[in-house]
Image (cartoon, rainbow, N blue to C red):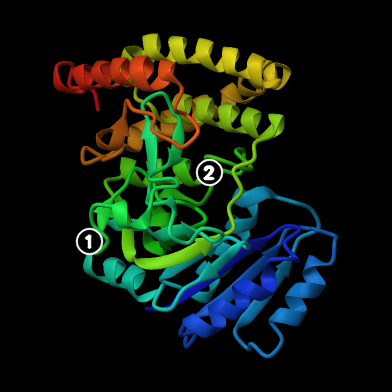
Amino acid sequence: MSSAFIIVTYRGKPYLEALFATLKRHTDLTDNRIIVVENGSGDGTLEELQRVTSGLDNVEILPLTSNRGFAGGNNVGIARARELGSEFVVLLNQDLELSEGWLPPLLEVMSERPLVAAAQPLILLHSEPELVNTAGNHLHFCGFGYCGGYRKPLESLPDLQSVTSVAFASGAALMLRMSALDQTGYFDESLFLYHEDCELQIRLRELGYDCVLAPRARVYHKYTASFSAQKYALLDRNRWLVLLKHWPLWRLIVAAPALFGTELAVLAFAAKGGWLTAKLGTYGAVAKQLPSVYRDRRRLQRRRSSHATDGAVLTGNMSFDGLEHPLITHFANPLLSAYWGFARRVLKVR
């Protein structure tokens, strides 16, 4: 099974030597390709790439003149992998280090489960390798995506051997089946950054595919949990674009009271956190994209499979390190979980 490893770089000079050292040390590169998309960093990243890949015959560096974001950069790499005839693409963040044996469990699940279109390894924190970065991401029915098991001790995870379905696999280290991407298309470049891995996998699930965690595969992520006003605004803008594009009408109607309540909470959070102006700007940004969102929505809802799996993985719970406020843990989570449980059991919302 041939794979193409796609690495999108942007101002990643400090990370590249460690990533490529572990890639070469722990990966059988026979019959596989490494495609590096340099997102117009302009800071010496391209020159560092040329240095650390010296001597590797199966590396192709594709320099871009501008930053096209996670979505656009990976789309360039995926398109090249399609030209090369790769069966799978493996997206790798520039700030990863890989462990011994990280790749075979991902290939194994793709070989044994033809309905799996996306698979991630267990991603651990590089600075605290006994703690989880993500064991598969969760998706709230109000559109919030977040890392599953973040900062939990590795030994606390219930099963470290079995492949398990997750709402969506992390784009930080992600294997994708090319034949499935041929049906869904690639990343939505209008999102640019954040939620693009989630949105793509919703499309895969709408066609009946599954997304999984293969925990025997391990990688280490130099993750930082810092948030700027711009990051918050992009996350929230993209959350609404995903909701409006993908949630079936009945799901949107049932979710509307919760969406209204969570929107008030986000506004309060933005005001307290100093990014209210950026949050208010998201309304105009979403409105500007509504015509294209509507066109995409009509197309996606028409092709939605009767075997779609996206609704089955939604949750009403938000459990993430740093979100332990009593209003969330003792009020919002129980209320929204009960509400979504009622919607699924009684109203048959999917």
Is 24 situated above or below 139?
A: below
Residue at 59 percent of width and 14 percent of height: 267
Q: Earlier in the sequence, mark 1 or mark 2?
A: 1
Can the viewer see residue 249 in this picture? no
Quadrant in the picture for the N terminus = bottom left
338 and 31: which one is in front? Answer: 338
Q: Position of residue 71 (x, y in %)?
A: 60, 49
Q: Quadrant of residue 37?
A: bottom right
Query: Which amino acid is tagged 2?
Result: Glu
Is 3 situated above or below 9?
A: below
243 and 341: which one is in front? Answer: 341
For disc 2, the marked residue is 196
Contact check, label 1 and label 2, Cβ < 8 Å:
no
Q: Position of residue 16 (x, y in %)?
A: 68, 70
Q: Position of residue 128 (x, y in %)?
A: 51, 58
Query: Which amino acid is tagged 1?
Result: Ser
Q: Secondary structure at mark 2?
A: helix
Q: In the displayed structure, does residue 149 sit left or right of residue 51?
A: left
Is 38 situated above or below 19?
A: above
Q: Quadrant of residue 332?
A: top left
- Few, some or many residues within 10 Å of mark 2 (<14, 14–19, 20+): many
Q: In the displayed structure, does residue 17 sit left or right of residue 47?
A: left
Residue at 58 percent of width and 60 percent of height: 93
For disc 1, the marked residue is 162
Marks 1 and 2, how far apart in space? 26 Å
Is 336 situated above or below 117?
A: above
